[in-house]
Image (cartoon, rainbow, N blue to C red):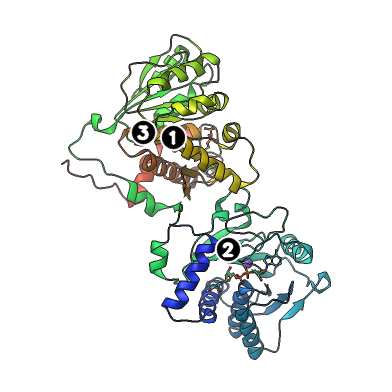
């Protein structure tokens, strides 16, 4: 699904008014009515005190439409106009008049802190203060109101955006509503997925307000949300008439004394993701552990017993993966540099491999095109330095991706996959996956799919999605706390089944 910017959404509104030959007030009525329907579906007429806080722009106008419908359906509603300026939008004004026509309980005007109502724990608060039109941080008494709402412990539902949040930028030090639920119009917004701002959104539901389909189809977006449908479309079935040679030969290089488990996890994940032949290259100390834990994997050892000092020079693999548990010893870094000199096939670099790249930036130039790096936030900071905010981080990651033609997987609660200017945001996964080794598993899955001849980008997107949905399958059974990284590896196949609600049909070999 495309994620649109505030400017694109405003353009979509404009085109919709022309094409559907409707007024902006009619569009607001449509949007507000859909919000009302969702609320009504949940409250079912319950006598809960509802407090609606409306700004004076179109987001406030939506709030007034919702207020009118709620009142007409017998709900106990108090409507507040948060009058932070006198520049009321036209559609706000017409809905203000319409509301006054149907009730004697006119909206209450708030012009300063003195006008704040009491907000109680059991209240249902609807936040219609600001939407995508916000152009600066919310400060002063409107910020105090937001803080009052946030500390009230009332349930808060935000219309379109939690007020104070902007879709495509962050305002430093402004107040932001912490919503329990956000009903957003037409497209999710980028800030809903970024680590610094995602917590304001609560549960998210995107409402289709029937903006012009043609515009939405054609609009050029670089940001995509990856869900089940997208993963399904990337997945390629196995062929009936096939053999292990058809499913890739991968070499995973990593580990050091005490960290051989990381390579076990990565290779297990590669095998569980369909790899035909998996070999690992590890320091000698890990030989027994590896052979015993995963007999399906072949093992080569470095001459050094505790760390990698040389890569196998003439090993013929479709894809290489390096870094988990490898340490950042000089000998290991030199070995990577030497290997990259001649390497043409894509490599997947994770963990200490990324730390080595950060310390030896000249190695980045040697990375084969379409290679993948998978930093978690700590590794990313070592690689690109500090960032001002999430948007700045994204710009820096895009620049790095473009400069070295790399696919960069920025791991987190919502993992971002950056390929040049394009950003793919993963929607699967859960906090149970915040556990040692789950990143090693992800590298194994990505490597496996590249080996199976997916493009590096398709392999990475599919792997990140399936890794997350496997994590969810496991935590649904075991709970978040008991999830082990190895469980994510073991359930990748079930995550594939879940894409199709059964085993995907194999294809005939051509
Ligand atoms: N345009 C349309 O056709 C539709 C718009 N809709 C609603 O319209 C919203 C956008 O409305 P608007 O563009 O009127 O903007 P908003 O209602 O989001 O609010 C912005 C208003 O607040 C002012 N403002 C911005 N930052 C401020 C700050 N920090 N402190 C004080 N005032 C500030 C702006 O000057 C403007 O007047 C959407 O989020 C959505 O809720 C919906 O009705 C659906 C259809
Ligand atoms: N809260 C979360 N929600 C969803 N996924 C998560 C969450 N926390 C971690 N993950 C996923 O788990 C993996 C953790 O990777 P990483 O930090 O490298 O772990 P390790 O270094 O222990 O292997 C990433 O793929 C990340 O996206
Ligand atoms: K809002």
Q: CA distance from mark 3 to mark 1?
A: 13 Å
In the image: residue 71, left or right of residue 461: right
Crowding near pointer 3: few (<14 within 10 Å), some, many (20+)?
many
Image quarter hosting the C terminus: top left
Q: CA distance from mark 3 to mark 2?
A: 37 Å
Asked if marks 2 and 1 touch (Cβ < 8 Å), the reply is no
In the image: residue 394, left or right of residue 175: left
User: What numbered label is drawn on residue 182?
Assistant: 2
> What residue is disc 1 on?
372
Asked if marks 3 and 1 touch (Cβ < 8 Å), the reply is no
Residue 292 appears in which quarter of the rendering? top left
The residue lying toward the viewer, choosing from 193 and 204, is 193
For the point 74% across and 68% down, the residue is 120
In the image: residue 66, left or right of residue 471: right
For the point 50% across and 26% down, the residue is 353
The residue lying toward the viewer, choosing from 427 and 432, is 427
Secondary element type, mark 1: strand
- Outermost left residue: 510
In percent of width and height, residue 305 lies at: 48, 10
Residue 298 appears in the figure = yes
For the point 43% across and 52% down, the residue is 227
In percent of width and height, residue 477 lies at: 47, 45
> What residue is disc 3 on?
448
In percent of width and height, residue 222 lies at: 45, 52
Image quarter hosting the N terminus: bottom left
């Amino acid at each position: 699904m495309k994620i649109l910017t505030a400017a694109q959404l405003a353009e979509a509104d404009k085109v919709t008014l022309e094409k559907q030959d409707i007024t902006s007030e009619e569009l607001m009525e449509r949007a507000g009515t859909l919000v009302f329907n969702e609320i009504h579906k949940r409250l079912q007429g319950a006598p809960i005190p509802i407090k609606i806080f409306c700004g004076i722009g179109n987001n406030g106008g939506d709030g007034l439409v919702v207020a009118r419908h709620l009142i007409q359906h017998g709900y106990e509603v108090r409507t507040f106009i948060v009058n932070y300026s006198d520049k009321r939008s036209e559609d706000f004004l017409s809905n203000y008049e319409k509301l006054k026509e149907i009730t004697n309980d006119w909206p209450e005007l708030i012009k300063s802190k003195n006008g704040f109502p009491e907000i109680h724990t059991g209240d249902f608060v609807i936040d219609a203060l600001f939407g995508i039109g916000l152009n600066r941080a919310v400060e002063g008494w409107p910020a105090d109101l937001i803080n009052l709402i946030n500390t009230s412990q009332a349930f808060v539902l935000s219309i379109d955006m939690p007020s104070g949040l902007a879709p495509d930028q962050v305002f430093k030090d402004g107040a932001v509503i912490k919503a329990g639920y956000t009903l957003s119009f037409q497209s999710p917004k980028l800030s809903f997925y970024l680590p610094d701002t995602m917590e304001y959104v609560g549960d998210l539901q995107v409402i289709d307000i029937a903006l012009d389909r043609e515009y939405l189809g054609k609009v050029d977006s670089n940001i995509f949300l990856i869900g089940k449908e997208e993963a399904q479309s990337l997945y390629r079935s196995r062929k009936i008439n096939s053999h292990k040679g058809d499913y890739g030969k991968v070499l995973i290089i990593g580990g050091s004394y005490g960290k051989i488990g990381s390579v076990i996890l990565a290779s297990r994940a590669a095998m569980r993701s369909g790899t035909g032949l998996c070999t690992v290259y590890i320091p000698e100390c890990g030989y027994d552990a590896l052979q015993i834990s995963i007999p399906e994997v072949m093992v080569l050892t470095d001459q050094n017993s505790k760390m990698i000092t040389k890569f196998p020079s003439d090993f013929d693999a479709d894809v290489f993966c390096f870094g988990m548990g490898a340490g950042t010893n000089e000998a290991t870094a030199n070995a990577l540099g030497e290997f990259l000199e001649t390497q043409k096939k894509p490599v997947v670099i994770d963990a200490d491999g990324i730390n080595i790249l950060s310390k030896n930036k000249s190695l980045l130039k040697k990375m084969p095109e379409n290679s993948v790096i998978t930093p978690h936030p700590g590794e990313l900071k070592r690689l690109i330095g500090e960032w001002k905010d999430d948007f700045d981080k994204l710009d820096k990651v895009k620049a790095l991706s473009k400069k070295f033609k790399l696919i960069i997987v920025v791991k987190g609660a919502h993992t971002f996959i950056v390929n040049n200017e394009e950003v793919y945001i993963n929607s699967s996964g859960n906090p149970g996956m915040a556990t040692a080794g789950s990143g090693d598993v992800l590298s194994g899955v990505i490597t496996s799919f590249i080996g199976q001849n997916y493009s590096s980008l398709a392999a990475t997107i599919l792997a990140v999605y399936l890794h997350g949905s496997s994590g969810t399958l496991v935590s649904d059974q075991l709970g978040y706390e008991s999830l082990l990284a190895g469980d994510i590896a073991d359930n990748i196949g079930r995550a594939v089944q879940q894409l199709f609600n059964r085993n995907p049909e194999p294809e005939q070999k051509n």
